[in-house]
Image (cartoon, rainbow, N blue to C red):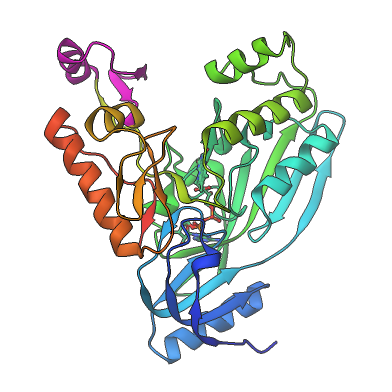
Amino acid sequence: MAITIEQQVQLSSHTTMGVSAIAQYVARIDSVEVLAEAFAWAKKNKVAVLVLGGGSNVLLPSYYEGLVLLIGIKEKLIIHENEHTVELEIGAGENWHELVEWTVEKGWIGLENLALIPGSVGAAPIQNIGAYGVEVEEYITKVQYMHTESLELCWIDREECDFGYRNSIFKKELKAKAIIVKVRFKLPKDAQIKADYESLRHFLMHQGIDEPSQQQIFNAVIQVRQSRLPDTQTLGSCGSFFKNPLLPTEQVDRLKTHFPDVKTYPMPDGYTKVAAGWLIDKAVGKGFRKGQVGTYDQQALVIVHHGGANGDQVHEFADFVQSEVSDMFGISLEAEVQII
Ligand SMILES: Cc1cc2nc3c(=O)[nH]c(=O)nc-3n(C[C@H](O)[C@H](O)[C@H](O)COP(=O)(O)OP(=O)(O)OC[C@H]3O[C@@H](n4cnc5c(N)ncnc54)[C@H](O)[C@@H]3O)c2cc1C
């Protein structure tokens, strides 16, 4: 299987932010063999490597000097099934939402709250994707990756993945060392579905649904997301640009004396999460715009690209948002998006 290397490729349509970004070299990866070849080629030619899935959580520079790997490893296997659970093995290049749709069609429970999150299955464990009261770590059992130096294929169990809020070992010890090629999930068939997340509950209540089915949760998540997040086909974005800061509760209590309506979520061990969207809304505002980049008019946590900007301009705007929030609240926001 010979690898094909393309040169000087425009990647704007490979990312949801849609900024202009030329890659020096690009290879499309549809198997672990081609992945190993790509790394051997990069080593021989002494070039850097960047991996892209759906490009929905990444901000690219105008020019990437090196080899970009577009991960398209496809596979959807049922590896074990009984009357209570099913175990799936899914290729990293499968589309996340399509996987969720398939599990809902089959009545396998768990992933419905994560419907419509853009991107690939392989990227899901990296930041432990989460939405509407569910994080994907609950359903992952194992992840297979290729080590970028030894090119060995390794399995890692959920317990070793060190999952946290939008975090995992793949953003820490294994950052840039592991290319995820497969993810295993274990889904129950008879578990309770999760409908207690506030905005989801309100939506269902307005629809007159008291005891939603799995399909109704799936449909509700899609409708709520479509009403709150930009359609990346028409407006560039990476969803939430920053993480919600996790601060010692004492510090948040002090903040509340000045800003009593600050939106917070109590967490274990003396910590409180502060809604980054609320902070940005107060410091910068929704729908604020500098040139072709701004905050989304319905949610300030989302940075949007109106077309014609490059990654540096988006980065500059993100720096501006961080410094406005820091000046007003003394809180430093951390980017959720991977800035290359
Ligand atoms: C409109 C919108 C809404 C969103 N909503 C949510 C949400 O509700 N919850 C949430 O958690 N996220 C959300 N996101 C963020 C994003 O969808 C997720 O982080 C998603 O998992 C990224 O997948 P991707 O394939 O697009 O990753 P990419 O953007 O392609 O890559 C992200 C990072 O992972 C690395 N990477 C990608 N694939 C691999 C691989 N196979 N092996 C190793 N490294 C890899 C890349 O190098 C990069 O550093 C949203 C984004 C958008 C645009």
Q: Position of residue 255 (x, y in %)?
A: 18, 18
Left-right relation of 212 to 12: right
Answer whether residue 329 is visible to the viewer in this image. yes
Left-right relation of 309 to 37: left
Numbered disc total: 0
Answer whether residue 146 is visible to the viewer in this image. no
Q: Quadrant of residue 206?
A: top right
Q: Quadrant of residue 174?
A: bottom left
Q: Position of residue 223 (x, y in %)?
A: 65, 30
Between residues 116 and 93, which one lies in front from this camera angle?
116
Q: 109 above or below 56?
A: above
Left-right relation of 245 to 180: left
Quadrant into which the N terminus falls: bottom right
Between residues 294 and 247, which one lies in front from this camera angle?
294
Q: Residue at x 55, y 43 (%)?
A: 158
Query: Is residue 269 magenta-colored?
Result: yes
Q: 146 above or below 168?
A: below
Q: Position of residue 221 (x, y in %)?
A: 64, 29
Q: Which residues are magenta?
A: 249-276
Q: Residue at x 69, y 32 (%)?
A: 112
Left-right relation of 38 to 219: left
Q: 339 above or below 226?
A: below
Query: Is residue 120 magenta-colored?
Result: no
Q: Quadrant of residue 288?
A: top left
Q: Residue at x 65, y 61 (%)?
A: 93
Q: Position of residue 258 (x, y in %)?
A: 15, 14
Q: Residue at x 66, y 34 (%)?
A: 222
Between residues 166 and 87, which one lies in front from this camera angle?
166
Quadrant into which the C terminus falls: bottom left
